Amino acid sequence: MRLEPKYKELLNSALERSGQRATKQREHIYALLLEKRNHPTAEEVYVRAKEDMPTISLATVYNCLETLAETKLIRQVNFEREPTRYCPNLTKHAHFYCRESGEIVDVDLSDQLLDELMKVLPAGFTAKHIEISYDGACNECHD
């Protein structure tokens, strides 16, 4: 799996800023997340990674995911009592989690909506990040 040049540059810059360097494992994991944006768990990333890199270990996958999250190249997505999932979409968005199928879908959030959400904070409070999650059933699973 090859990482597109623009994403390779993004990866190299982010890692350099954090005092780290790109490795073929980090590039591979990042490319997998960008290729299929289905919010996989670490175990799902591991299974996909082994297809092209059979010697990669689960520990290496976890370490790569942690590094990518620390450098803000991906986001961790957490739902109550569910394993952590990983999202390479860095735009302002929410997540919809279908309890029936397990599918997670990105939901775009407008700047106007985000501005309105910031206005409801108590006086003197500031937020650097808003995380919104929907929990329910998708159209295919809804009664």
Image: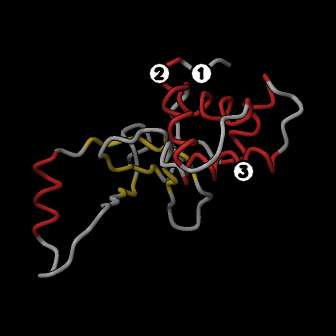
Which residue shows up at 56% across the image and 50% down it?
18
Q: Name the residue that disc number 1 marks.
A: 3
Q: Which residue is mark 2?
A: 6
Marks 1,3: beta carbons within 8 A: no
Instruction: Name the secondary structure under disc 1.
Output: loop
Q: Disc 3 residue type?
A: Asn
Q: Which residue is mark 3?
A: 63
Indicate the position of residue 37 as horizontal and vertical percent values: 50, 33
User: Label 3 vs label 2: CA separation?
Assistant: 23 Å
Residue in the picture at 33% in, 58% down: 132
Q: Helix or strand or loop: what does disc 3 sit on? A: helix
Looking at the picture, does residue 136 appear above or below residue 16?
below
Q: Which quarter of the image is occupied by the N terminus?
A: top right
| Residue type, numbered disc 1 | Leu
Between the C-alphas of marks 1 and 2, the distance is 8 Å
Q: Amino acid at mark 2?
A: Lys
The location of residue 6, given as percent across then percent down, is 47, 21
Q: CB of mark 1 within 8 Å of CB of mark 2?
A: no
Q: Earlier in the sequence, mark 1 or mark 3?
A: 1
Crowding around mark 1 (Cα neighbors within 10 Å: few <14, some 14 to 19, many 20+) is some
Nearer the camera: disc 1 or disc 2: 2
Q: CA distance from mark 1 to mark 3?
A: 19 Å
- Residue 64, image x and y in percent? 68, 45
Residue 118 position (above or below residue 75)? below
Q: Is residue 9 left or right of residue 90?
A: right
For the point 38% across and 46% down, which residue is it?
Answer: 142
